[in-house]
Image: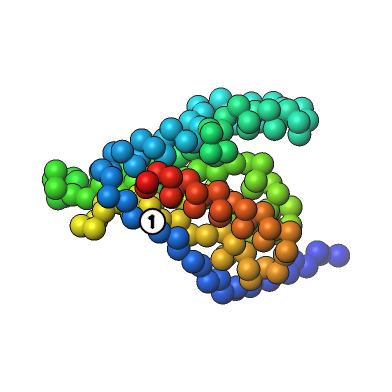
């Protein structure tokens, strides 16, 4: 007898909130402050170390070695301003998207809401505007509200507080 496969399609409306702080400091100073606060592991080595870890405490050691003083590490970055500069030249605004996080925090959220994996690690957007350098972050708790998990919300709210403190410190 043939096995019947069922496909279920679902759509969930999510409403996000954006936290933004504006700095009067130069763009590169803000970026340097953020870079000093987050770890910058070699991601190939990091992935290999996580893969070869035999136990969760071994994974914790790998992550704790990779994170910076903020408790976060940089996974990747996208220099959007470089692309703008190809068209506009030297006067193009600088825009940088950093993807940062902590796999141990992510684990705590996805244990309760697997969809939380869509939001962690998080994106920090740093961009120059006429009124200053904007540091923006879409709060994870705002996206996870729709899932109704108090456990995931507690972790997300703590994560949001840490990211907001990181951005505020970089802007100061």
The residue under the point 26% across, 53% down is 132
Q: Is residue 11 above or below residue 101?
A: below
Left or right of residue 142: residue 154: right
The residue under the point 37% across, 47% down is 171
Could you tell me residue 95's position as x and y percent?
A: 30, 49
Could you tell me residue 49's position as x and y percent?
A: 64, 26
Q: Can residue 81 be seen here?
A: no
Q: Quadrant of residue 19?
A: bottom left
Residue projecting furthest to the front: 172
Q: Is residue 51 above or below residue 141?
A: above
Tag count: 1
Quarter in which the N terminus is drawn: bottom right
In this picture the colour scheme is rainbow
Q: Which secondary structure lies at badge 1?
A: strand
The residue under the point 56% across, 59% down is 140
Could you tell me residue 100's position as x and y percent?
A: 50, 43
Could you tell me residue 150's position as x and y percent?
A: 73, 64
Q: Is residue 78 above or below residue 54?
A: below
Left or right of residue 4: residue 70: left
Residue projecting furthest to the right: 1
Q: Can residue 112 be seen here?
A: yes
Circle 1 packing at 10 Å, graded few (<14), some (14-19), many (20+), is some
The residue carrying mark 1 is: 21
Q: Quadrant of residue 53?
A: top right
Between 113 and 171, the one lying in front of the other is 171
């Amino acid at each position: 007898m043939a096995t019947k496969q069922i496909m279920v399609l679902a759509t969930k409306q999510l409403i996000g909130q954006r936290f933004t702080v504006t700095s009067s400091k130069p763009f590169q100073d803000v970026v340097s402050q953020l870079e000093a606060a987050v770890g910058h592991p070699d991601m190939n080595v990091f992935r290999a170390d996580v893969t070869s870890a035999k136990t969760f405490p071994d994974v914790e050691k790998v992550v704790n070695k990779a994170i910076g003083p903020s408790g976060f590490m940089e996974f990747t970055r996208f220099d959007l301003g470089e692309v703008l500069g190809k068209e506009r030249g030297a006067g193009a605004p600088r825009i940088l998207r950093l993807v940062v996080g902590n796999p141990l925090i992510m684990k705590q959220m996805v244990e309760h809401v697997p969809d939380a994996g869509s939001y962690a690690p998080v994106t920090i957007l740093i961009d120059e505007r006429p009124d200053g350098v904007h540091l923006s972050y879409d709060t994870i708790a705002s996206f996870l509200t729709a899932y109704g998990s108090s456990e995931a919300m507690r972790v997300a709210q703590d994560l949001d507080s840490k990211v907001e403190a990181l951005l505020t410190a970089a802007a100061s």
